[in-house]
Image (spheres, rainbow, N blue to C red):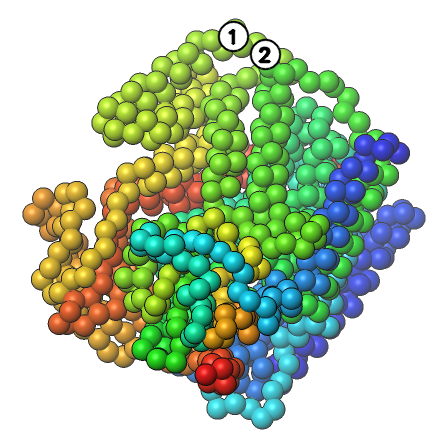
Amino acid sequence: MTAELGHMALILAFCVAAFQAVIPLVGAHRNSARMMEFGDRAAVGQFLLIAFSFLALTSVFLSSDFSVKLAALHSHSEKPLLYKISGVWGNHEGSILLWVLMMAGYGAAVPIFGKSLPPRLKARAIAIQALVGAGFLAFILFTSNPFERLNPVPMDGNGLNPILQDPGLAFHPPFLYLGYVGFSLPFSFAVAALIEGRVDSVWAKWLRPWVLVAWSFLTIGIALGSFWAYYELGWGGWWMWDPVENVSFMPWLAGTALLHSILVLGTRHSLAGWTVLLAITTFALSLIGTFVVRSGILVSVHAFAVDPERGVFLLLLLGIATGGALTLYALRAHTLRDPVPFNATSRDGALVLNNLLLTAALATVFLGTFYPIFIDALDGSKISVGAPYFELTFTPIMCLLILFMGIGPMFKWRADTIKRLRVPIMLTLKVAALVIIAVALLGKSILGALALGLAAWLAFGTVLAVGRKSNWSRAGVRAQPASTWGFAGAHIGVAIFTAAVTSMSVWGATDIGTLKVGDSLSLGKYTYTLEDVGGGQRDNYNFLAGDISVTKNGRDVTTLSTERRFYPVRNQLTTEAGLHLSFGQTLFASIGEGDPEGGFVVQVYRHPFVVWIWLGALLMALSGFVALADRRLRLPSSKEVAE
Amino acid sequence: MKLRGLIPLFGFLVLVGALAFGLTRDPRILPSELIEKPFPEFALENLEGSQIIDPKVLQGKVSLVNVFGSWCVACTTEHPQLMAQRDNPDIQLVGIDWRDTRDAANRWLVRHGNPYDIVIFDPNSKLIVELGVTGAPETFIVDREGKIRYKHVGIITPKDWKDTLRPLVESLQ
């Protein structure tokens, strides 16, 4: 019964979305307040219906109702509670349901938080949001019904893929989707603005918090995915330029550019056309990401089910949404003229440079990811693009970006001169030089020294910029708006991230050996000793466990427990690395096959400062949320306007 | 309307065209012309770097040629299936280590076990491109004359082995 109710709610939501996509548009055209208000109510109603449907599916998974095909395929009665819940979105149908839930959630936020928006802009944006939402609801109902029943009913479920049974991955998709889908609001508002033929600072100011929200969630989502790959896959890498990773990274790059260009639009009323184009692009890239992952068009290590029918449907959705928006852009872009020309040495100029570099970085990732498809289309040969390409092309652009990030925020809006900033720039340069020399001497790596120097340049430049903004006084610091702290935190997050990636790749160490109980391996000052090996059965898997004690200069540091797990239901083998996460040296060991006589294969790692990769990303995301508190981003409420 | 405004739309249409084309080309299907054809020519070092391997190693025995890499997560899942065939006298296991470094591959093989009789080292996708491989793991069955008889994309599950690969290998003996 629950499944049928959920299905009904979904069908109703589709009907509501269909009306919501048309009536407010007509209302805005005819200037009918009643028709426009319908959109407000429909947006909330659509969200409630989908939320009900999502809860129904969750309850199906929780009660292990295996007469529903999706639960039978992806759940198991013996699965731990957390993974029964995450199993809801750990599959194609459920994850698309999660997508529409969030899409409707963001849509419902417009009438709730957007009371002061111009009514026609609001009505149009709500309608566009519903139009895309209706497309996805149709996608679920016609190709991926999560509530399909199964006959005969199986005794037990098939189990969730064990490699996905992990807290990191349980929360990775929801955050990623909160980000992806969050960019649907800028998209809807961009299209609404193109219909109106004007973009102004009210538009930019209302939208910027939502761009921040989506961007912050996407940052968390990507970081969680990377962290999961690091500790669950157990081979010591945190990013491998896999197509599935790249397609989540591309909306991030575009979103970051959008975040900065919308700032220019809100403050200086320029970059209107470009910002609208970026808003469309960012969401289009989110759609492309979903398309790539769900259609299986690019083969990747993340194995997902391939279904051409779904691929065609998603491509159609992508084509109609993005193609429609870009056609509108082609027709209307010339009306969004920028009133003021740029001055290269100014905050505006620096932000334009930021956008150019981010776009260039986006283009290299895009090319590397889709090159195999283009080549196949042109001459039928199959090629693949690996990490070396990305390291060669993407890294230099990012280094250049960081170089400008260090001093860009010191410039004033409108017009400034390098001469005025000579002192702080020279000071930052000296700090960076000092770091480079110190690291080169201590760390014995020129590359490491240059990269850490770059990070220091950025961090120190950011601190200087905040100091100058507040005139080096305590009162000035206290008077800084939230967006200053958001900027400072995010930029320092990038500096931390850069430093961590550098130290991990330059000074990390690993070794492998066949150890009997009592034998040890050494990495510098650290000694890893295999203390104990045991096996047994737990929850839904069998395991072989090894305890490895680690000492530093003879003093105990920690004991790492590593496991090899075998999941009989799926006939799948996974490795759980024994991980000692630390702000300094992260130590980590994994056990392989072997026997007590011949010894067990053990691999050990020492990764300095690797956790700061994710802490840096987390700082960026949190800074995004901090910047939300900025009062200047609030629009005057309708009451204030009336007064 | 200015022509400049059309540029994004045009770029997008090219992309959609390519994506639509990509949909019709299942990356998991071998260009059919390779099936029943001799294994493509190649001369690559083995993983140890001690000798050059060429298609002659595929003569006289039924071979299972498996594309793997230490970076490939799915390969770890497939690995027990290959390990189970390590001592099967009817079949020669040939690994192609793809987009990898010798160090990483050796570590991976030591850790998970080495089921292969021969490992071909292909860091620059030379042989892989000839084979039309787009992802790992991927597996070819090659008969005694060195002709490709079957291609399997993705993980070999116990069911795949039992229903498809084992009967095929037995029929080729």
Identified by mark 2, the residue type is: Asp
Q: Is residue A329 left or right of residue A632?
A: right
Vertical order, B125 against B24 (above or below)? above
The residue positioned farthest toward the top in the image shown: A419
Q: What x and y, as percent, mark residue A259?
A: 60, 36
Chain identity of mark 1: A
In this figure, which residue is indicated by the disc labeled 1? Answer: A420
The residue positioned farthest toward the bottom in the image shown: A152
How many angstroms separate mark 1 from mark 2 (CA)?
Answer: 7 Å
Q: What x and y, as percent, mark residue A7?
A: 67, 77
Q: What x and y, as percent, mark residue B52?
A: 38, 54
Residue A408 in view here: yes
- Could you tell me which residue is drawn at 38 percent across and 39 percent down? A501
Q: Is residue A196 left or right of residue B64?
A: right
The secondary element bearing badge 1 is classed as helix
Chain identity of mark 2: A
B55 or A523, nearer to the observer: B55
Residue A192 in view here: no
* Image quarter of residue A68: bottom right
- Could you tell me which residue is drawn at 75 percent across and 39 percent down? B8
- Could you tell me which residue is drawn at 15 percent across and 49 percent down? A522
- Which mark, by number, is residue A416? 2
How many other residues sit within 10 Å of disc 2, few (<14), some (14-19) or many (≥20)?
some
Q: What x and y, as percent, mark residue A106?
A: 64, 53
Q: Are marks 1 and 2 in contact (CB under 8 Å)?
A: yes
Vertical order, A507 against B108 (above or below)? above
Identified by mark 1, the residue type is: Arg
Q: How many marks?
A: 2
Quadrant of the snapshot with the N terminus of chain A: bottom right
The residue positioned farthest toward the right in the image shown: A30
- Could you tell me which residue is drawn at 49 percent across and 20 percent down? A407
Q: Is residue A241 left or right of residue B93?
A: right
